[in-house]
Image (cartoon, rainbow, N blue to C red):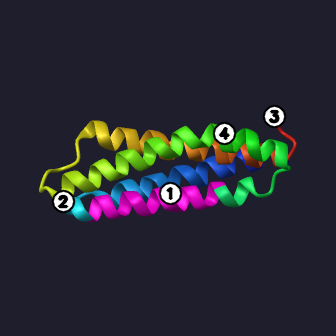
Amino acid sequence: MKKLFAPRILLVVFVLAMVVGCATQGKSNIDQAIQARAAFNITLGSFNTNLATLPAAQQTKYANKAVPVVKGGVLALDTMDAMVASGVSPTPETLQQYLAAKNALIDMIAQIVLEQKGVK
């Protein structure tokens, strides 16, 4: 049963990423920016929820790893918002920065879950 847990988590994360990706196609720039920020905030909330399940020393380890990732994600989202506000579409580079940050948080969530399950 434990061996199936990690692949199921990754499958769920993949499906969510696909749904968010498909949902942004054909949307206006403002809708895409809002959906990106919402997806990032949901991922960050999940990270914080899972982080709280760890002992303090491990929380500190993951929190220290997450700080630059979150800052990068917020910077990318703020840049997207500024671009949209000025009538410009977000650049592929900005979208990639956002996705990299969101995916890094998802990876850390998976690491936390695996650590909780005793898999390293």
Q: How far from the left and from the top, in percent, is residue 54?
A: 82, 51
Which residue type carries mark 4? Asn
Give the residue at x 57% y 45%. 105
Q: Is residue 99 visible?
A: yes
Q: Earlier in the sequence, mark 2 or mark 4?
A: 4
Give me the C-alpha separation between circle 4 and circle 3: 19 Å
Q: State the residue position of label 3.
A: 120
Give me the C-alpha separation between circle 1 and circle 3: 24 Å
Question: Dot 4: what SS?
Answer: helix
Which residue type carries mark 3? Lys
* Chain part drawn in magenta: 31-47
Would residue 68 be counted in the magenta stretch? no
Which mark is nearer the camera, 2 or 3?
Answer: 2
Which mark is nearer the camera, 1 or 3?
Answer: 3
Q: State the residue position of label 4.
A: 64
Determine whether, in the image, residue 26 is placed left or right of residue 99: left
Question: Dot 3: what SS?
Answer: loop
Q: Earlier in the sequence, mark 1 or mark 3?
A: 1
Q: Is residue 3 visible?
A: no
19 to 14, vertically: above or below: below
